[in-house]
Amino acid sequence: MTASTEASPDAASDGVVPPPDVLRPKGFSLGSSGSTGWNLFDDDVPFPAAVIIESALDHNGATMRSFCDRHGVSLAPHGKTTMSPALFRRQLRDGAWAITAATTWQARAMRFGGVPRVLIANEVVVPSEIEWILAARAEGFEVSCYVDSLDGVSILNETAERTASVRPVPSGATTGASPTVDGRIPVYVELGIVGGRTGARTVDEAVRIAEAVSRSPHLRLDGVGGFEGIIVDGDGWSAEQLVCRFLDRIVEAAERMDAAEMFEPGREVILTAGGSAYFDHVVDRLSRAHVTQPVRVVIRSGCYITHDDGALHDASPMGAVCRTGHDDRLQAAIEVWGAVLSRPEPTRVVIGIGKRDASTDGSLPVVKKVRRRGSHSVESVELNRFVQVNDQHAFLDVGIEEPWRVGDLVGVGISHPCTTFDKWRAIPIVDDDYTVVEVAETLF
């Protein structure tokens, strides 16, 4: 698919291949919004089934927007969490400045889904992908990427030079709804950590890379970025202390680049970092930068929109322990429902939910709700974590007197949204009565 033939944002829903009919009871159309007339507990809905609770989505969106507004920062959530245009639209409606991608392929999918600005928080070194960025920007799509080496700068330059010799890139966009952008590729120099993923290992190295970018006629130095989510305790330092030291290095790099006049005059400097565990520290530390031009601090938490009932809830500054100074607690929005298939032993219940349906990489799912066989109401139950999960089965140890029966429907909470979303082609968004109001298609 070339940039010139990609579907327009308005055509995104129609262009997605719908899921099988069994996922669309009563003839529901994937591209529709508003009440669908069907409910999770209708007789023709198959299980297991994942759903997203709309009231939790709304709460989380409003909570994050309030946090950003209070601190004067912007949000570019990691779109790889959901890869869902329906949720991108909600995030943009809530004021997101951009959506973050991890790959050029994801950026293309986001453009297809109607996102006007994408930050690729990763290096782009494949010439065909760089050519796509240049072509997309020429058509008015705002897309940027990271760079962390002089080799990376050279590849970007060489590809842009070759592309320009064949097809000159216009200095401004002539199509699309995005603001006019120039033909250069905006890049952020990435800082990393020793033994970690990508990113320059020292501030000196980052400054040298920034100098090469600033000399390029094909690149534009827009800021400095990094990712703190992989930092753990070590060498007598807590993870939080090491995160703050890392973020201070991003600030130091930006200040040195500014002092050397590497940033384009009159253009804001963007400082960005962000996972879902330390975005409060990102705001605190990056906001301390002293440069001569306006600074936009961009956090990139992606999991906030649905949150979870496991590792993220424990780690988030808006989770089990609220670190923001306000009652900013996020709510778990994802539930996976399955039926009790068997009670083969008095203390063992087997539920039809497995690794194919719910993530297990953060921690095992927890039982949250039950709809008893023959009942029309949903009960909240004490959180009870599975003891084992296979491909299609989850095992729950229970007390002999607990009233679990074959045919009961069980709603579980997950740990780590990313690897639950990528298991489903489409996830219904439901109201508090589990009536479907929209379907969030996914583009993995």
Image: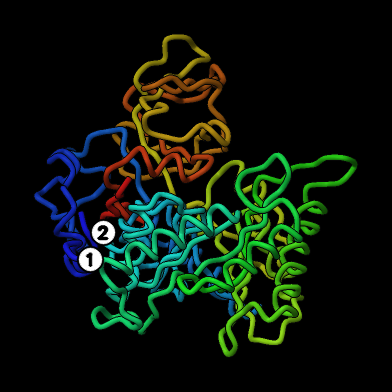
Name the residue at the bottom extreme: 266
* Residue drawn 21% across the image and 39% down it: 45
* Residue drawn 66% across the image and 67% down it: 327
> Percent x, y for residue 409?
35, 33
Mark 2 falls on what kind of element?
strand
- 128 relative position to 199: left or right: left
In the rendered view of the protein, which quadrant contains the C terminus? Answer: top left
Q: Do callouts 2 and 1 mark residues in contact (Cβ within 8 Å)?
A: yes
Mark 1 Cα shell of 10 Å, populated few (<14), some (14-19), many (≥20): few
Name the residue at the front extreme: 165
Q: Is residue 42 depicted above or below 246 in this figure?
A: above
Q: Is residue 371 depicted above or below 26 in this figure?
A: above
Location of mark 1 (residue): 34
Residue 131 image-quadrant placement: bottom left
> Percent x, y for residue 53?
39, 55
Q: Is residue 296 depicted above or below 10 in this figure?
A: below
* Residue drawn 49% across the image and 15% down it: 348
- From the viewer's side, name the closer residue of 283 and 249: 249
**How far apart in space, not on screen, are marks 2 and 1 (Cα)?**
6 Å
* Residue drawn 52% across the image and 39% down it: 381
- 123 relative position to 29: left or right: right
Residue 439 image-quadrant placement: bottom left
Q: Is residue 343 depicted above or below 36 in this figure?
A: above
Location of mark 2 (residue): 438
> Percent x, y for residue 215?
57, 73
- 77 relative position to 352: left or right: right
Q: Which amino acid does label 1 sit on?
A: Gly
Sequence-earlier tag: 2 or 1? 1
Mark 1 falls on what kind of element?
loop
